[in-house]
Amino acid sequence: METAPCPWRDGVLLVCINERAPGAPKPSCGRDRGAALRKLLKQRARAAGVDGLRVLEASCLDVCPARGVAVARVPGDEVAIVDPRDDSDIEAVIAWARGAPR
């Protein structure tokens, strides 16, 4: 095995893009909403100068909100439920990714 330095010094955000079938017993974050949120988080992180943050798509994070999209911070021990239409949620996630308390 070979290793290399990790360029993600500010960590990783995992954005759920899981899409369940209509009528499934659990809600899903949704592929379109999750992908749109990922793109927005990447843009905002760059604009805020958070270059060492990686924002990735993930399948189900096992936190299935009826509204919003699940976002996990790695390293971390919480999952945030983010409303992609709420600017304050977006800004809070960027700060949370940098280690600021929510």
Image (tube, helix red, strand yellow):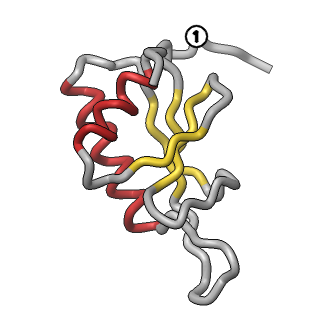
Furthest residue in direction bottom, as rendered: 23
Left or right placement of residue 39 versus residue 81 in this view: left
Residue 80 picture location, percent across and down? 52, 41
Left or right placement of residue 67 versus residue 84 in this view: right
Q: Amino acid at mark 1?
A: Pro
Q: Residue at x 65, y 58 (%)?
A: 60
Residue 61 picture location, percent across and down? 65, 51
Furthest residue in direction left, as rendered: 47
Residue 56 picture location, percent across and down? 49, 42
Quadrant in which the C terminus appears: top left
28, 50: nearer the viewer: 28
Q: Secondary structure at mark 1?
A: loop
Q: Residue at x 29, y 28 (%)?
A: 45
95, 9: nearer the viewer: 95
Q: Residue at x 43, y 15 (%)?
A: 100
Q: Is residue 23 above or below residue 19?
A: below
Disc 1 packing (10 Å; few <14; some 14–19; many ≥20): few
- Count numbered badges in the picture: 1
Q: Residue at x 33, y 57 (%)?
A: 36
Q: Is residue 53 above or below residue 64?
A: above
Quadrant in which the N terminus appears: top right
Q: Is residue 51 above or below residue 91?
A: above
Residue 78 picture location, percent across and down? 62, 33
19, 65: nearer the viewer: 65
In the rendered image, which residue does mark 1 sit on?
5
Furthest residue in direction right, as rendered: 1
